[in-house]
Image (tube, helix red, strand yellow):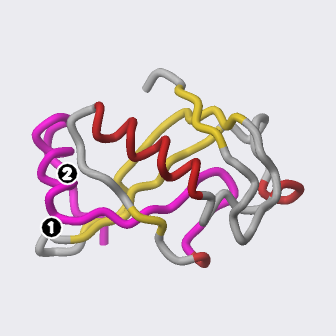
Amino acid sequence: MQAVTFNTNGLGYWSRTAKAVEIVDMRINYINDEKSFGELCVYFNTDTWDVNTMGLIYTDKQFKRELNEFLVAQGLATAEYSEQGMQGEDYVSLDVEGKFLQLWEAKFGTVLVVE
């Protein structure tokens, strides 16, 4: 994936940092057996965002808006933040529904169910 940049506005519950965040990868890391729900992990360059000093991107509305605009522009559907405990040191975890998974599979090929 070619790196893209999304911005935070610093108004989330877990961070007050407003800055550009370089995104380096996006992966589906979980899909339920019915393929009606999954987890999209959006990986960021830890040189541009350090969760230990800047906090979690989780709940930042600008980041989610820019991400969803990007996803839709790529022919995918939108995503919602997953719970706080799902967030990683180098990724933002989001919930995706069946429509997203169908569009992802059509665009990128077979989606494997990770158990």
Q: Amino acid at mark 2?
A: Val
Residue at x 38%, y 40% (from the top left corner): 69
Classify residue 115 as left or right of residue 48: left
Q: Is residue 46 or residue 57 the one in the foreground?
A: 57
| Residue ID for mark 2 | 111
Residue 9 falls inside the magenta stretch: no
The residue carrying pointer 1 sits among few (fewer than 14), some (14 to 19) or many (20 or more) residues within 10 Å by Cα, namely some
Quadrant location of the C terminus in the rendered image: bottom left
Instruction: Tell me where residue 108 sits by quadrant.
Output: top left
Where residue 85 sits in the image (x, y, percent)?
Answer: 60, 78
From the top left corner, tell me how far across and down residue 103 is, in percent: 15, 46
Q: Disc number at residue 62?
A: none
Q: Of discs 1 and 2, which sits in the foreground?
A: 1
Tell which residue pokes out farthest to the right in this image: 53
Question: Label 1 belongs to which residue?
Answer: 35
The residue shown at (63%, 32%) is 22
In this view, the residue in front, 71 or 41, is 71
Q: Residue at x 47, y 71 (%)?
A: 82
Quick check: is 88 in the magenta stretch?
yes
Q: Give yes or no for contact between labels 1 and 2 (Cβ–Cβ under 8 Å).
A: yes
- Mark before the other along the chain sequence, 1 or 2: 1
Side (left or right) of 70 relative to 50: left
Q: Amino acid at mark 1?
A: Lys
Mark 1 to mark 2 CA distance (whole Å): 9 Å
The magenta stretch is: 86-115
Compared with 85, 73 (above or below) is above
Asked which secondary structure carries label 1, the reply is loop
Please identify the quarter of the rendering in which residue 101 is found: bottom left
User: Which residue is depicted at the point 48% across and 48% down?
Assistant: 65
Snapshot quadrant of residue 38: bottom left
Q: Position of residue 12 (x, y in %)?
A: 69, 64
